[in-house]
Amino acid sequence: MKRVDDFRLRFGKKELVPIMIGGMGVDISTADLALEAARLGGVGHISDAMINTVTDRRYKTKQVKEKLQQYKHNVSNSDKSEVQFDLGRLEEATKLHVSKTMEAKRGDGLVFINCMEKLTMNAPKETLRVRLTAALDAGIDGITLAAGLHLGSMGLIEDHPRFRDAKLGIIVSSVRALQLFLRKNAKLNRLPDYVVVEGPLAGGHLGFGMDWAQYDLATIVAEVHQFMLDEHLDIPIIPAGGIFTGSDAVAYLEAGAAAVQVATRFTVSEECGLPANVQQEYFKTSEENIEVNQISPTGYPMRMLKNSPSIGAGIRPNCEAYGYLLDAKGNCSYIEAYNRVIAIEPDAKRIKVMDKTCLCTHMRNFDCWTCGHYTYRLKDTSHKHEDGSYQILSAEHIFHDYQYSTENKIALPVKHELELAK
Ligand SMILES: Cc1cc2nc3c(=O)[nH]c(=O)nc-3n(C[C@H](O)[C@H](O)[C@H](O)COP(=O)(O)O)c2cc1C
C-alpha cells in the first residue's frame, strides 16, 4: 500500500515531499505555517492579501493608520476613487513580509506566496506589478497566481531578473481557464512551473458558479491531464480541494498528479493565524453549518461557516483604511449594498447588510470564517477535552499524517500532558 512519502514533487533537479499547504488569505497561512512545510521538505505558502495590515501586525509598522489619516476626509463619501495605495509603501510591506519569512527558512522545502488577482486595490495593474516584483526582489521561492484568470500577470514581471528562475504557478478550476492562461501568455515563452487544479470543495473563493456541487475534482483533474497529453505539455498538476487524508492524496498521486495542495486540515494547527476561539468553531462545526454564499464583493462564491460574524454585519465600508477590493474606478459591491440599506433605513442605529460583506474588515478581524467543505471532519483529527474544546495540533503532526498514513487513517496527536494528568 503506497503512502504520499513514496512520491516526490520534482521541479528540475529539486525533489520535494509532494505536499503543498495552500495560501490562506489575510495571514491564516502564516509565515510560521509556511516555514514548517518548508522545514519538513514540502511547499508552504504565505499570502500577500492585505499585506499592509499584515506587516503592521507582525512588524509594528503603521501603514493602515497612515492611510486612514491621509483619506479620513473621504470616509462618508461613497465615491472612493480618490483612495489610492501608495505603491512605495506597498512595496515596502511586501518586501518586509517576504524577506523576514525567507530569512527564517530552514530545511529543503520551498516557500511560495499566494497572490490573488481579485485584490484590485483601486489600480489593478500597478498594484499587482508591485506585489509580484517586490516578492521576487525579496527572494520568494515561487508565486501562485490565484483568484482570477491572470491573463496579463506574467507579462507584468517578464523583465524581472528572476522571471525564469522563480517558480510560477497558476490556480485553475477548469481546462478552459488553463487554456486561456496559456494562450494569453504564449508569447512570453515561459510555461508555468505548476498548475494547481482546485475543485469545488476548497476553502476561500471558488472558481465555480453557484452550481459548484455539479463539479468534482477528480473529473477536472482528468480533463487537465488529457489536455496536457493532447498538447504535449509536461507541467506538474497539483489537485486541491477536499483532499483530507493521506490516502485521498495517494489516489491523485497514483493517477499522475505531481503533488497535492491542502489547507483545511491546517486551519486547526498551532502555526495557523486563526485565533484560538475561531479554531474551536472550525472543530465544532457540523456539515449543515457550512455554506457557499455570494456575499464576497469579489463576485466569486465563497465557502464559510454560517455563524460567521461577517454575515449580515452592516458596518460602514472601511476603504480609507483598507480598500483592497476597490476596482479600477474605486467601486466595491459592498459599498453599493450598504448604501441601498442606508437609503431604506436612514435613521437606523444598526443595520444589517445581507447580500454583500465588507470582506476587508472581516478578513482582517478573522470574522469571516471561510473554510473547506470537510471542515466538519476536523473533530475526527484531534482529542476533545472535558470542557468540550478540542486539542490544537502541530503543523508537523498534520503534515506527517498526510505523508505517512495509509488506509484513510488519521493519526491522532499525543494527548497534551495536562489531559493525561486528569
Ligand atoms: C481558511 C481558508 C482560506 C483560504 N484562502 C485562500 C486564499 O486566500 N487564496 C487562495 O488562492 N486560496 C485560498 N484557500 C484555498 C486553499 O489554498 C486550498 O487550495 C484549498 O482550500 C485546499 O482544499 P482543502 O482546504 O479541502 O484542503 C483558502 C482555504 C481555506 C481553508
Image (tube, rainbow, N blue to C red):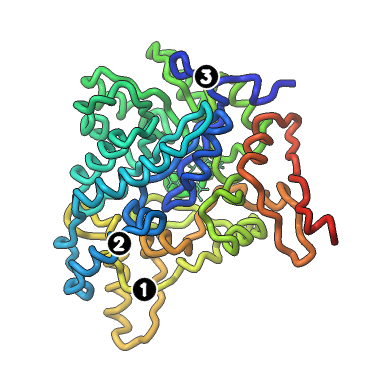
Q: Is residue 25 above or below residue 405?
A: below
Residue at 19% across, 68% down = 71
The residue carrying mark 2 is 62
Mark 2 burial class by Cα count in 10 Å: few <14, some 14-19, many 20+: few
The residue carrying mark 3 is 15
The residue carrying mark 1 is 315
Front of the two marks 2 and 1: 2
User: For numbered disc 3, what is the local secondary structure?
Assistant: strand
Residue at 54% across, 43% down = 263
Front of the two marks 3 and 2: 2
Q: Are marks 3 and 2 in contact (CB under 8 Å)?
A: no
Separation (CA) of disc 3 from disc 1: 48 Å
Q: Is residue 278 left or right of residue 229?
A: right
Q: Nearer the viewer, residue 55 or 256?
A: 55
**Identity of the amino acid at label 1?**
Ile
Label 3 CB, ligand 1: below 8 Å? no
Q: Position of residue 89 (x, y in %)?
A: 23, 52
User: For numbered disc 1, what is the local secondary structure?
Assistant: loop
Q: Earlier in the sequence, mark 3 or mark 2?
A: 3
